[in-house]
Each structure stands twice: as C-alpha cells, then as structure tokens.
Image (tube, rainbow, N blue to C red):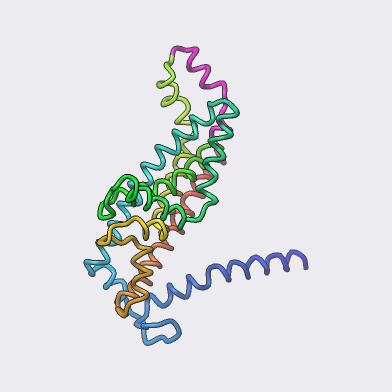
C-alpha cells in the first residue's frame, strides 16, 4: 500500500507539472483562438509559425544570441572554475562567494544594473547589442562555473602533475589533460547557458535594442496585443521547444547510460 501511495503521489506531481504543457500542445493542433473551445483540428498554427517573416526573424535572432552568449559564458565560466580550483584556499573561497551572488540574485536586479552600467557609466547606447550580450553573459557565467567545478573535483589531481613531469608545459597540460577530463561539465554548462539565454526575460527587457525581441519578450508583448493569429502560432512554437528539450534529455540520458555500462 505504501508503494502504491508513493507511485500515485509521483504521478499526481508529474500530472500537475506537465498537464498544462500537454493541453497547450493539444490546442496547437486546433483552430481554436482561446483555450477552452475546440473548433477543429488543423496545422494552421504551424504554417503561420514557419511562414511569418516576423516570427522567423525573432526565432533566428534568439537562437544566434543564445549560442553566442553560451560560447562566451562557457569560455569565461570554464576559465574561472579552473583558475579558482588551482588557487589558494582563501582566494578560492572569495571567488566561490562572488559566483554565488548572481545565482541567488534576482534577474531583474542584474538586468537593471547592467543597463545602468552600460548607459550611465560607459555611455554605450541601448540600440546596440553590447548591453544585452554582457547582461546575459553575466547571468550565465556563474552556472557554467557551477557545472565545471564538480568535474574538476572528481578529476585525478595527479594527472596534471604527471603531465608536467613528462615534459608538458602548463598550457599544453591544460588543453591536453585537464580540459578533456572536464568536457562533460563544459558541455552541461554550455547547454545550461543556452537554456538560460532562451528563457531570460528581465535582463533582455532592460538591455535589448528597441527593434529586437527574444522569444520571451516577444511572447509577453504578443499576449498584450490583439493579433490572435500570432498568439496561437506561439502555441506551436512552445510545443516545438518542449519536444526538442524532451528529445535532447532522452538522448543525453541514453548516452550517459551507455557510458556507465562501459
């Protein structure tokens, strides 16, 4: 009975989490203009999504931004984690505490602070992409750091010293010994940075140019408007994003299971 109760509780939690997404997916294949009434099944929402120039440009712009921010964040976060790991204890503690502040801090504070820093202090105009890239990078770097650091702690510490004893320079030992050992952490940090950039709303709102929209800012602005066709097309976009995430998670777990089996 306890086992049945635990299973029922788990399924109830999963239903609570995924039922809204499944309902949205269902309505993305209908002609309905609002949740609650089904007029008929259609792929019109997906047709609108892939044929509307405004939506296509918004999606491509968001993806390019996410990839660029993820690359920059991965380099900075990985370098910071390696530098912190091989620093003295007091220095490492200070770096870890400083890294935790952006993680705990509200995104709206980060976005507003970057906006003030770029415009009021450095006099960089908001119609450029510099504040947006810097703001999202500041948001993502701490999470890359947290993804890489556990891999460094799990690594055999004598490998680096052995490489130096065998004639490697510190730079060569870094790229040939340490980085290959922490690739899973770097990959995890890179994917986390992409997810954070795609999901970010507050930082993008305060730092983006007026003529540019990410998926998050576009969705919020669209729900305030009266373009019903665009709103329902966003149901289709949400469905595609969810399915891509599910496929990626399943594939990553299969690869991880195969590695453990070896």
Q: Is any atom of residue 98 visible in this view?
A: yes
10 in relation to 84, above or below: below
Q: Position of residue 181 (x, y in %)?
A: 49, 31
Q: Position of residue 118 (x, y in %)?
A: 34, 48
> Relative to residue 76, is residue 60 drawn left or right?
left
Q: Is any atom of residue 133 visible in this view?
A: no
228 in relation to 119, above or below: below
Is 87 inside the magenta-drawn segment?
A: no
> Relative to residue 161, is residue 228 drawn left or right?
left
Q: Nearer the viewer, residue 141 or 131?
A: 131
Going 49% across and 45% down the picture, which residue do you hit?
A: 143
The extreme front residue here reads 120
Quadrant assignment for the N terminus: bottom right
Going 52% across and 43% down the picture, which residue do you hit?
A: 258
Q: Which quadrant of the figure has residue 10? A: bottom right
Quadrant assignment for the C terminus: top right
Q: Position of residue 235 (x, y in %)?
A: 38, 72
- The image shows a total of numbered marks equal to 0
Q: Which residues are magenta?
A: 152-167
Q: Nearer the viewer, residue 30 or 103?
A: 103
Going 43% across and 76% down the picture, which residue do you hit?
A: 26
Q: Which quadrant of the figure has residue 241? A: bottom left
Q: Position of residue 246 (x, y in %)?
A: 46, 59
Main secondary structure type of the part rendered in magenta? helix
> Relative to residue 184, is residue 218 drawn left or right?
left
216 in relation to 180, above or below: below
Going 42% across and 87% down the picture, which residue do you hit?
A: 37
């Amino acid at each position: 009975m306890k086992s049945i109760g635990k299973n029922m509780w788990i399924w109830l939690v999963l239903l609570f989490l995924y039922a809204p997404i499944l309902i949205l997916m269902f309505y993305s294949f209908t002609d309905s203009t609002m949740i609650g009434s089904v007029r008929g099944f259609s792929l019109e929402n997906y047709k609108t999504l892939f044929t509307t120039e405004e939506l296509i440009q918004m999606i491509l712009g968001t993806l390019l931004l996410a990839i660029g921010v993820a690359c920059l964040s991965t380099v900075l976060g990985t370098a910071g984690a390696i530098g912190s790991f091989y620093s003295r204890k007091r220095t490492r503690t200070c770096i870890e505490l400083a890294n935790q502040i952006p993680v705990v801090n509200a995104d709206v504070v980060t976005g507003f602070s970057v906006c003030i820093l770029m415009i009021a202090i450095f006099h960089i105009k908001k119609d450029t992409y510099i504040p947006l890239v810097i703001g999202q990078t500041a948001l993502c770097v701490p999470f890359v750091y947290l993804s890489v650091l556990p891999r460094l702690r799990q690594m055999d510490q004598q490998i680096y010293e052995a490489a130096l004893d065998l004639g490697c320079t510190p730079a060569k030992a870094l790229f040939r010994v340490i980085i290959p050992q922490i690739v899973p952490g770097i990959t995890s940090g890179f994917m986390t940075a992409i997810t954070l950039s795609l999901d970010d709303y507050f930082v993008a709102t305060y730092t983006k140019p007026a003529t540019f929209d990410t998926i998050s800012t576009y969705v919020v602005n669209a729900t305030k408007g009266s373009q019903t066709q665009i709103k329902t097309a966003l149901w289709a976009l949400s469905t595609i994003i969810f399915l891509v995430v599910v496929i990626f998670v399943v594939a990553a777990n299969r690869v991880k299971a195969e590695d453990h089996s070896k």
